[in-house]
Amino acid sequence: MKRSSGIIMHITSLPGKYGIGTFGKEAYEFVDFLKDSGQSYWQILPIGCTGYGDSPYQSFSAFAGNPYFIDFDLLKDEGLLEESDYKGVDFGKNVESVDYEKIFLNKMPILKKAYENGYKKYSEHIARFKEEKFWAKDFALYMAVKGKFQLVEWQKWHEDIKLRKEKALEKYKEELKDEINYWIFLQVIFFEQWTKLKSYANKKGIKIIGDIPIYVAADSADTWANSEVFLLDEEKNPIKVAGCPPDAFSATGQLWGNPIYRWDYLDETGYKWWIDRMKGSIYLYDVIRIDHFRGFESYWQVPYGEDTAVNGEWVKGPGMKLFNAIKREIGHIAVIAEDLGYLTEEVIEFREDSEYPGMKVLQFAFDTREESDYLPHNYEKNCIVYTGTHDNDTVNGWLENGIKEDVEYCRKYLKLNRHEGEHWGFIRGAWSSVGHLAIGQMQDLLGLGSEARMNIPSTIGGNWKWRVKKEYLTRDLAKNIYDITKLYGR
């Protein structure tokens, strides 16, 4: 990467009239805002179908896209909807927050109407998509069966379809043929709209940084259709699940609950499933941020059924064997390695062997108890510097609510002052660093407080909701971002 900068804001956070950010007009205007701000990158969170808890890191598929992002006005332009189909529908009253329940209850029926209006026009597209995307048939069948069984996780389906018995598969494929085509239609539209938006961004000189979680959800088309890839018992329940050990932030660790990979099986198959996943990702993004990258060197696994992550253990991962296999098959891929947290010498060596840049989060730098690798004077050039990530408080929120001694250290180190604006001084700390790429949260560039925080880790409810108000994205803001970007040669 050449010296540059960008902004992280998820699709859900875009402004718009229909309750949640989409691939429509406001997304194109945000690309224009990035261009006017002198930015080179737009980073987003995972764009898969979300389920319980609405977390983009717990998706129904590692390959399929989230239909919530499909834009109604673009469907109207295609002749698939009338404006009266969606105008006046309640998608949530608060323009600064996503109401996921209303999006689920009120958006999906409108998308069903678009399918009914457009099936004949799109029938060939649907048939071609089924054949071209190896995952599409299993995903659509999974979603259709899930709907039939009132959305319960697949481990609670009837035994025959849970275990993918041939007769059951054929039975449900026939019984749910229309619903299967509907889910394929949604993917056709999703990929059409996303590809056009990404192409527009690229033509404007903006590259897209996508984000893929290391693990997949236990309740996903991936675990159902490819159960041999995961450490599951005969009843298809996880034997061990993923998490993080106890540390200074959590006395009981973090219990994520995702099934662990059977790395021995993946090795025997030449890591085909992971190679396919990376191929799907490079189709969607210009750069891939891999979440919890250290888990490929060693990962924390916990027996299934535990209430906390305390009784887990470290297990060696595939390390460079996986990434060498990916490089042999695909060639060079632009990757950002999320290497946050406690790093052993082995993890550091693994990340260096991969040659992927790691992450430096400026909010983590100011621990008065010890010298931090996240302080800018300790950076190497091959790194990506963040003001904060989706899991952090906003800069202003942290300055207000963080540990007093750490905040004062930060103010002294970065020479923060109210005249400049403390959040701008913090951004200056990232932009002026030697790291190849500096990324700021949109909330930080706007100087918003904790009310705009995207996620509080290990909590359910109230997360992933923040949206930017359209009137916040002004010419003056774009100029301020442009000026600091130009000043520090990004």
Image (tube, rainbow, N blue to C red):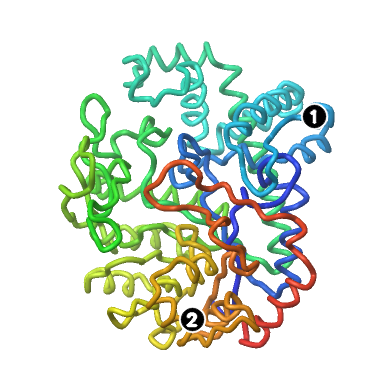
Q: Residue at x 37, y 52 (%)?
A: 214
Provide the secondary structure element on which disc 1 rests: loop
Q: Is residue 375 above or below residue 305?
A: below
Check residue 104 in the rendering and tell me which mark sits there, or answer none: none
Tag 1 residue:
81
Who is closer to the viewer here, 59 or 271? 59
Q: Which residue is mark 2?
A: 435
Which residue is painted at 26% across and 30% down in the image? Answer: 237
The residue nearer to you, when weighing 233 against 5, is 5
User: What residue appears at the point 45 percent right and 75 percent down from the top-left corner?
Assistant: 362
What percent of the width, then of the height, locates residue 212? 46, 53
Question: Picture coordinates of residue 456 (x, y %)?
Answer: 44, 53
Question: As drawn, is 247 to the left or to the right of 433?
Answer: left
Q: Is residue 415 above or below residue 116?
A: below
Horizontal placement of 287 versus 37: left or right? left
Q: Is residue 167 above or below residue 51?
A: above
Q: Image quarter for residue 296?
A: bottom left
| Residue at the image point whose x is 50% and y is 40% from the top | 54
Residue type at mark 1: give it.
Leu
Q: Is residue 211 left or right of residue 238?
A: right
- In depth, the one of 256 and 62 nearer the eye is 256
Instruction: Report x, y in % for residue 37.
Output: 72, 73
